[in-house]
Image (tube, rainbow, N blue to C red):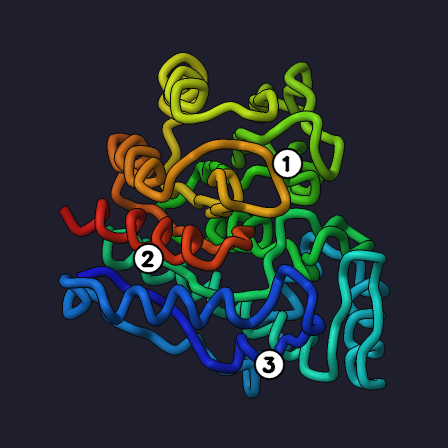
Amino acid sequence: MLSVIYSDDFLLHKTGMLHPERPERLTAIVHALKAAPWAAQIEWQLPTPVSGHEQKLLSEIKKVHALGYIREVEHLAHRGGGYLDGDTPISAESYDVAMLAVSAWLDGVDRVWAGGEPTFVLARPPGHHAERDRAMGFCLFSNAAIAANYALKQQGIKRVAILDWDVHHGNGTQSLVENCRQIAYCSLHQSPCYPGTGEADERGGYDNVLNIPLYPGGGMGEYLAAFESQVMPFLSKFEPDLLIVSAGYDATAADPLASMNLTPSDYATFTGYCLQLTRRILFGLEGGYALKDLAESVVATIERCLH
């Protein structure tokens, strides 16, 4: 069995008809997972409700985000919505949905650590571009960074690694964890591409950052070389107790927001590498905007964990 943490409430974050980060992303994935021949091996879990736990969630979010920024998101949403930046619209429900997404990621940490098996957090909005005091690139709260800091409070977790295979560099995640010696961050990303960050010579405060920029047009050959020569040695040396994967699926050839050439099945190979390190893996959805490829990529990820 593999746990998938999901709620229909994640569909309530409205971004507008033509925005690529739309609710249909999740419905496409849910339909594909329920149609998979091994669907009975998925244990669907609702995230812990925000109501009654808001102070706990705020406490965890404030570890990485400025309180003024958190209140800015809340106030704009509760006034009916608007734009936090040019790419990041929010609606009246978006603050509450973003809080629920954080709750889901924290639940994922708890579930992975207690059970020793992978869990997939199927939530939105995504988070890896969100910086301490600003929204960016469709992202409100930095879910992976919040989850990593939260994980360090658990008995037995001394080191957390974040592997970000989204096609865009997770500038927010890196900025929020690079000065913590107990967290490692590794990103494979197209370069040049939004947001224009993630140079290979950035190493973090404790040699705990590895950025692997990849030229546009690259495919599985380039990714395999990177995993073999850089990703696996880096993560193996760090010896994480918990691995968090910022699971973006926008490096497929069909994706409209990038120019890489992966196929959905390639993510099964990436997942296999992760499983060589540990089965204590928390996957959390980031990008991916070609609906068919997105859904098939998540299916490939989860199927690899089941075998």
Going by the numbered disc 2, the residue's amino acid type is Thr
Upstream in sequence: badge 3 or badge 1: 3
Q: Which residue is mark 2?
A: 119
Drawn side of residue 61 relative to residue 84, left or right: left
Between tags 1 and 2, which lies in front?
1
Q: Which residue is mark 1?
A: 169
- Give coordinates of residue 219: x percent, y percent: 45, 26
Going by the numbered disc 3, the residue's amino acid type is Leu
Question: What label sits on residue 12 in the rendered view?
Answer: 3
Drawn side of residue 208 relative to residue 95, left or right: left
Where on the picture, by quarter, is residue 96? bottom right
Going by the numbered disc 1, the residue's amino acid type is His
Count residues near mark 2 (Cα–Cα under 10 Å), then give few for <14, some for 14-19, many for 20+: many
The CA span between labels 1 and 2 is 23 Å
For the point 36% across and 16% down, the residue is 228
Residue 77 visible to an observer of this rendering: yes
